Amino acid sequence: MGKKIGMMQPYLFPYLGYFQLMAAVDIFVLGDDLQYVKESWINRNRILVNGKDKLVTFPLKKDSHHLNINQRYFSDNFIQEMEHLLRIIFSSYRKAPCFESVYPLLEDILMYDEKNLAKFTIRSLRRLCDYMRIETPILVASDLVIGEVADKQERVILTQKKLGGDVYINLIGGMKLYSPERFLEHGIVLKFHQIDDICYSQFGNEFVPLLSIIDVLMFNDLRKMQNLLSRYSLLDHMGQPA
């Protein structure tokens, strides 16, 4: 397999599959200059509270919905909101097996004094990757100077060509967005990442799947994380093993 590249919008504390993709590729590009999507996973996710999933949102300043991710900012009460979230995390996970090592990491991430959504999120992803020992180089799309490209597929192809990639891996949810034939015209093989059915102990209660990486880290030490990061399949556009 040639040089593998993945590209995603920067998400705050995304689910395990996002980090599996990061670990699976040779270069990972964070699309900070993509348009912000309201009610997406860019600035919200789910954690475990009292045995149930709870949606947590990182509030942003009101602004035009046409702005890019790197043009959006957190609300003025940003610090208070982060402190409140830390209290929720402390209360919910203080008895989790990996709390003592993970909570200080979350404090470092959440109390970082940066109100720009993209800059804050990119730093948080890098800190999380460092903790999980994911060594994939992380690039920022706006630094690559691809230029304004309205078509998402063409943008990905241009990014691939600029970085010398010949395999593009996308999360399974984007399977209908891309044409494998179009990629092949440029010598690029298109593959899709699908996370396995994963279950781990959450205080011995019924398992709540696909929560934020916060939950995964609280219950799984680094040795277990290395195994979890490898629990996925790569598929072609027909859903067959690739």
Image (cartoon, rainbow, N blue to C red):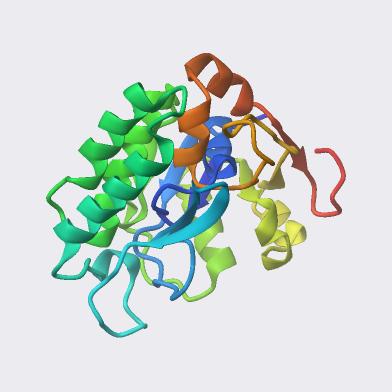
Q: Does residue 133 appear to the left or right of 53 in the view shown?
A: left
- Residue 16's quadrant in the figure? top right
Asked where in the image residue 68 lies, by quadrant, the reply is: bottom left
In the visual, does 101 lie left or right of 171? Answer: left
Q: Can see residue 26? A: no
The image quadrant where one finds the C terminus is: top right
Give the residue at x 33% y 66%. 69
**Which quarter of the picture shows residue 92?**
top left
Q: Residue at x 42, y 47 (%)?
A: 13
> Where 64 sits versus 205, above or below?
below
Q: Nearer the viewer, residue 86 or 187?
A: 86
Residue 233 locus on image (x, y percent) = 75, 36
Residue 239 is situated, as x and y percent measured from the top left of the image, at 84, 50
User: Would you say 82 lies left or right of 161 here?
Assistant: left
Name the foreground residue: 56 vs 93.
93
- Where residue 225 sits: x, y (%)? 54, 23
Residue 114 showing in the rendered view: yes
Point 43% across, 29% down: residue: 95
* Residue at the extreme top: 223
Q: Is residue 63 above or below residue 237?
A: below
